[in-house]
Structures are given as C-alpha cells and as structure tokens.
Amino acid sequence: MIYDALIGPFAEFEFMRRALAAVIALSLAGAPIGVFLMLRRMSLVGDAMAHAILPGAAIGFLLSGLNLFAMTAGGLIAGFAVAILAGVVARSTGLKEDASLATFYLASLALGVTIVSIKGTNIDLLHVLFGNILAMDDQTLLVVAFNATVTLLVLAVIYRPLVIESVDPLFLRTVSRAGGPAHLAFLALVVVNLVNGFQALGTLLAVGLMILPAGIARFWSRDLTVMICIAVVAAAVSGYAGLVLSFQTRVPSGPAIILVATAIYVASVLFGRVGGVVRQMFPGRHLEA
Amino acid sequence: MAQLAFRNVTLGYDRHPAVHHLNGEVASGALVAVIGPNGAGKSTLLRGIVGILRPLDGSIHLGGLDARDIAYLPQSADIDRSFPISVFDFVSTGLWRAAGLFGGIGRVAREKILRAIASVGLNGFENRPIGTLSGGQMQRVLFARVLLQDARLIVLDEPFNAIDSKTIADLLALVKHWHHEGRTVIAALHDMEMVRTHFSETLVLARGPVAWGPTAEVLTPENLMVAMRMCEAFDDSATACAADDISSRAA
C-alpha cells in the first residue's frame, strides 16, 4: 500500500522517474540561489525575473511551437538581456535594482503574452505559464541537469565575493572589484535556474522552488551553510511529495509541488527553531547566558 | 613623506559636492582626526580615500600604495547584520588580500584570525552570528578585521560611535598601537576631547576645509564655530562651480 503510493509510480513509469530526476536537479541548484536571493532581499526580484523570461520563451514558441529546447534558449536570452540591462541601469544610475527590474519585467511580460497569443491557444499559454514536468523528455532533462551543474560550479566561484557583498558591500569594494561581476554572475544564475524551473513549473511558479525552500531554511538555522543544505532538502522533498500528490490526485504537477513547499513553509513559520511562532509564544525558561 | 595627497579634490554625489576643493597632504605615519558636524562630508572624504567614491574633480594620491594596502572600517549602519555569518567568518574576510577568491584558510591563517579576535577581547565569540552581538562587540569585530588586514593606511569611519567607555578605551589603545607601528591612521570622529587628547593632527571639515594642522592650533572655538555654521546645501538648480574658472584665471 505504502509502496504503491510512494514508490510505485516511479518504479512503474519512466516519465515519473524523469520528473523526479529533474526536480532533484532543480533543487540542488535552485535552492542555494534562492537562499542568496532571500538574504540579499531580492526575493521579489527573482519573481520579476521569472516574468522577464517569458518573451524569449514565447519567441521560441512562435518559431518552433511547443519545443522546450527552443523555448529554453529564448528564455535564457531574454532573461540575460533583462538581468544585465537592469543590473547595469541600477549600478550606473543609483536606481534601486528592484525598481529597475520592475520596469523591464512588466514590458517583458506584456510582450511575452502578446507573442504567445498571436500564434497559440489558451492551452499553449497555460503550458508556458505553468509548465508540465511530466512531459519532460530525455533531451530536456539533460539540459536541466547541465544547467544545474553549471550553476553549482559558478556559485562555487562567486561564493566568497557574493557573501561579502551581501553582508558588507563597502568593505568588498575597498579590497576587490569582484563585487560587480559576482553580482551580475549571480543574476545570470537566477535566470538560468528560472529557465530550468520554467520547464517544470512554468514561468509563474518557477521561482517558487527557489524562494519557498529558502524561506523554510530561514526558520531552522542561523548558519548560511546549514541554511543552504536545509533549503536543498526542503526543495527535493517538496518536489518528490508534489509529484506523488499530482500522480495520486491528478492535480497539475507544478502547482502540487509548490503547494507542498507552501505547506512545509507554513509548518516552519509555526514550529521553526529560529523565530517560529510557537517558539516565540512558548519560549521556555530563560537561560543563564 | 606624504602618504596621502589631495589635489583640489571635490567629492560628492550626482554632481552635488559633499567635500569641496580640498588640498593638503597626510604624512606617512600620521594620526589624523577628521571632525565636523553631521553632513560635513567626513564619510564622503573617507570613501574617496579608499576608492569607493571617485572624485568629481581633482585627484587623491595614495603615495604609491596599492588600494589593497588600505584597511577601511565602515560605519556599522552599512553592514547587514541580519546576514547569517559568524564572527570568525566575518573577521576572516580581512584576509582577502592573501586568500582572494579561492585561497583556503589554513592552520596559520586560522591562528591569525583567532589571535585577531582575541586581541579585541572577543575570545569565545568565534561561532556567534554577528546579528547577536551588541553594538560595542560588533565594533570590536570590525577592529579585528582591520588588524588582520595588516594595512599601511587605516581609515576609520566614526569607529567609537554609540559604544561604552571601556570599549572605547580598548579600541583607542589599538589605534595608538597602529600609530606607534608607523601606520597612517585617519579617523572621522565627533568627540572633541578625544581628538584633543589623542590625535596629533586634525582636519576640521565643513563641506570644505575649515582648518587643517596640529590639533592644538586647529581645534579653536573660532574654527569650530565656522564649522557649526556650515549650512547644508543641496540645490538642484545650482549653477556649475566657478572656483575652477577663478583658479585657472589666477594661474
């Protein structure tokens, strides 16, 4: 019974195994990016970027229909363009990055929806907006795995300046010029992972598997490394449980994954060790030091 | 020998000057206090020295120093203390010059970091997240990082703000130790008594230089009154500064 519910779908169906592999790759790369987005107070920037990739994906769709490869390439190009333009405008004018991104992403979203509606149907639009991880083929899975690998390698390279820039940006500027390039590389990684998530969850929910696990981790640890590990595990568990839920109840896979992550988030808000509601209401006896 | 030379330096933001036409030199090994009311341009000047802010006009010469030979202690408000990083990891960033992007923290470096943390009286705080420290403890952490940087020029932006007298005494002893080692120290300060007692040279700043020289000569009621009367000026419709035209005509 438990085997049938929790393991059976993956043992029996190849598309479920592919979806599970994809969701684990997404978790390994996307969750650490989400932790940095949250700590740099850029959670909504991630959301804005998710909208920004839409016109690129839509142009890919316009040129070759629902071909995930073409849509990925288009999404990457559009995302990079918006990330770099917004980053450059913010750094050269003093305009806050979120304000800069807001203008670019709104234009991008409007353009994307217009392009899809020129050629496609409402079902196509739904696919682009909400994704379908269960329809992932081998080639797309390889792209997702490749992007995740690149993300982890680049993150390792920029990790040190990224941490220092987050906590003490003025200090970093006095000892190194790595802050600017690290920030731009980080924005590029956000785009890569949004496009990755876009395959599985669509443009609207792609950021969910990055930000929700990061939010969950914040309630369980004050240590960056531990937070990243918790976020990865939370994302992978949400992905697995979401797929099972989707398989058993016919709920669409993307929303199912995000709903499971949301449930874990709510539990963390209530019972988390660091600032959880219950912990604050019943803190126990005070300590000696 | 001059460690720092200002040549008609104007620093500011978006063409609006915060420090106007500063000329002068800081000798190698000097201990200089920069004083002035809020908005006088003290932090702006220090940011110009460490290269965070590029001059709108004029130039700052660092006497052959590489930018990385400068240690900068920013104001606490510029640091995101909610970021989950421990005291040890935060102080270790002072080794950037040696470790760079990929260098590891080996046994020797680890001992250096622990020594720096101990030197500022924070033994046992190594694993504490910086968000759990008091204002004075955080200031000690910043001093530990400066210690680790082992720089020839040390720039301190209001290092003794809102901390208790014991912490001030401890940290001031460190500043004097750096001075005795022959390092050049420049600090933006508000406490006149401290400046009078411990700093041999003073720059009174009020959006421009009011006076600069030996503290006993510079720290006069007249100069302080001039600085206090300084009016904050930020006028979007201001015309371009004519001082450069005047000086070029005089030349």
Image: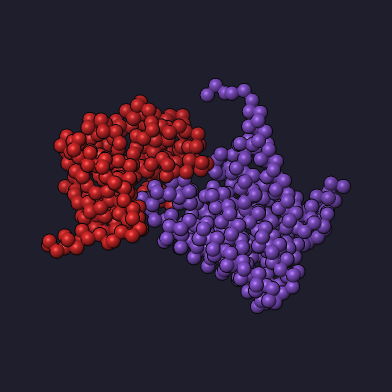
Chain colours: A purple, B red
Quarter in which the C terminus of chain B is drawn:
bottom left
Residue A130 vs residue B110, the one in the foreground? A130
Residue B145 vs residue B109, the one in the foreground? B145
Q: Is residue B173 visible?
A: yes
Residue A225 vs residue B197, the one in the foreground? B197
Q: Count the numbered circles shown.
A: 0
Q: Quadrant of residue A218?
A: top right
> What residue is shown at x 46% (from left), y 37% (from top)?
B87
Vertical placement of residue B34 versus A238, above or below? above
> What residue is shown at x 23% (from left), y 38% (from top)?
B224
Vertical placement of residue B106 versus A48, above or below? above
Q: Which residue is most to the top?
A: A288
Q: Is residue B70 visible?
A: no
Q: Say whether residue A262 is left or right of residue A168.
A: right
Q: Which residue is most to the right?
A: A1
Q: Quadrant of residue B137?
A: top left
Q: Quadrant of residue B239?
A: bottom left
Residue B37 vs residue A211, the one in the foreground? B37
Vertical placement of residue B8 versus A199, above or below? above
> What residue is shown at x 61% (from left), y 66% (from top)?
A109
| Horizontal and vertical percent position of residue A24 | 68, 54
Q: Say whether residue B32 is left or right of residue A49.
A: left
Q: Which residue is most to the front?
A: B237
> What residue is shown at x 74% (from left), y 70% (from top)?
A122
| Horizontal and vertical percent position of residue B206 | 26, 45
Q: Say whether residue B19 is left or right of residue A203.
A: left
Vertical placement of residue B156 versus A99, above or below? above
| Horizontal and vertical percent position of residue B132 | 50, 34
| Horizontal and vertical percent position of residue B48 | 30, 51
